[in-house]
Image (spheres, grey):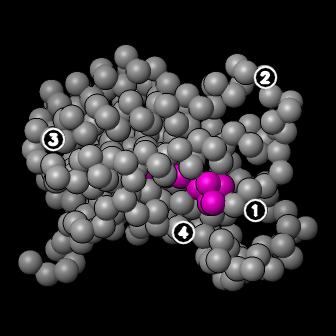
């Protein structure tokens, strides 16, 4: 087996939440191109079907699972369907994230609880149940897409970083608990990516002086620049990487 062979996902099954667009889609596409059957999940069936078609057009295999990540019963049904259809789950990428850019003082308890449920609690329960399925085959990769927002703070963004730091803690804890079972747990912390959600900011020329000053590579990241990190952590090439946070930010968080 060559080093390139160790990146192959042939014969494996992956679930990517929020896989219909943005970074989730790029991760799903990369895993499929490496040979995995990728189940893309999200709330909007039409978006997922379009993603499945795009992956198929690129030569990959994918299917859609439309459910709300915050619905734990729907999570369990999706995992049960994966087990029935494929008999295994090898990779889980918890990618879904919501953001509420308001000052903490302006957020009521319901808004805080909703964000924590979507950004943290749902990932905890899905990771737990996915690990139980992976355990049956003695192999698995749990990956959480967090954020540099879990490392550095911005004004009016109090709950999102708290949830992302919680995800970091979750992956480190699961690394300890599930490592003996052949399941590794790691996180990817993206910086400023020019996704659909950030399109207006990425196109704002007034922000470019800040980008050039704060990001050593002096630009926004392309969405597909997340793919290599996800494929690495999902692969046998990362078999001894466990409990790690891989920061993909062009050097933003290390610049003084």
In the drawing, does residue 165 fall left or right of residue 9? right
1 or 2: tag closer to the N-terminus:
2
x and y, in percent, of residue 20 in the image: 48, 42
Which label is found at residue 108? 2
| Distance between mark 3 and mark 1 Cα atoms | 41 Å
Helix, strand or loop for disc 4: strand
3 or 1: tag closer to the N-terminus:
3
2 or 4: tag closer to the N-terminus:
2
Q: Residues within 10 Å of mark 4 (few under 14, many from 20)?
A: many
Total tally of numbered discs in the picture: 4
Q: Nearer the viewer, residue 71 or 66?
A: 71
Q: Which residue is mark 3?
A: 135
Residue found at the very far top of the displayed protein:
73
| Distance between mark 3 and mark 2 Cα atoms | 40 Å
Q: Which residue is mark 4?
A: 248
Helix, strand or loop for disc 3: helix
**Which numbered disc, 4 or 3, marks the residue closer to the eye?**
3
Magenta segment:
143-151
Q: Nearer the viewer, residue 73 or 42?
A: 73
| Distance between mark 1 and mark 2 Cα atoms | 30 Å
Mark 4 near mark 3, Cβ–Cβ under 8 Å?
no
**Which numbered disc, 1 or 2, marks the residue closer to the eye?**
2
| Distance between mark 4 and mark 3 Cα atoms | 29 Å
Q: Residue at x 86, y 32 (%)?
A: 105
4 or 1: tag closer to the N-terminus:
1
Using the image, determine if residue 43 lies above or below residue 163. above
Q: Which residue is mark 1?
A: 202
Q: Residue at x 57, y 47 (%)?
A: 164
């Amino acid at each position: 087996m060559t080093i390139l062979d160790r990146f192959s996902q042939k014969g494996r099954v992956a679930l990517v939440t929020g896989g219909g667009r943005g970074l989730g889609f790029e991760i799903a596409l990369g895993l499929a191109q490496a040979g995995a059957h990728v189940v893309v999940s999200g709330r909007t069936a039409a978006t997922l079907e379009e993603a499945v078609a795009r992956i198929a057009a690129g030569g990959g295999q994918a299917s859609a699972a439309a459910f709300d990540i915050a619905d734990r019963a729907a999570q369990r049904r999706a995992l049960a369907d994966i087990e029935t259809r494929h008999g295994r789950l090898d990779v889980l990428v918890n990618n879904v994230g919501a953001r509420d850019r308001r000052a903490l003082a302006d957020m009521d308890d319901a808004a805080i609880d909703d964000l924590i449920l979507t950004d943290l609690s749902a990932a905890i329960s899905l990771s737990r149940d996915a690990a139980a399925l992976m355990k049956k085959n003695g192999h698995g990769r749990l990956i959480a897409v967090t954020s540099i927002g879990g490392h550095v703070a911005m004004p009016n963004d109090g709950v999102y970083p708290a949830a992302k730091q919680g995800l970091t803690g979750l992956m480190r804890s699961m690394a300890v608990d599930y490592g003996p079972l052949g399941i590794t747990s790691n996180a990817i912390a993206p910086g400023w990516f020019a996704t659909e959600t950030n399109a207006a900011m990425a196109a704002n020329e007034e922000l470019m002086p800040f980008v050039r000053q704060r990001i050593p590579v002096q630009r926004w990241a392309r969405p597909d620049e997340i793919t290599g990190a996800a494929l690495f952590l999902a692969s046998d090439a990362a078999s001894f990487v466990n409990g790690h946070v891989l920061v993909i930010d062009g050097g933003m968080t290390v610049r003084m």
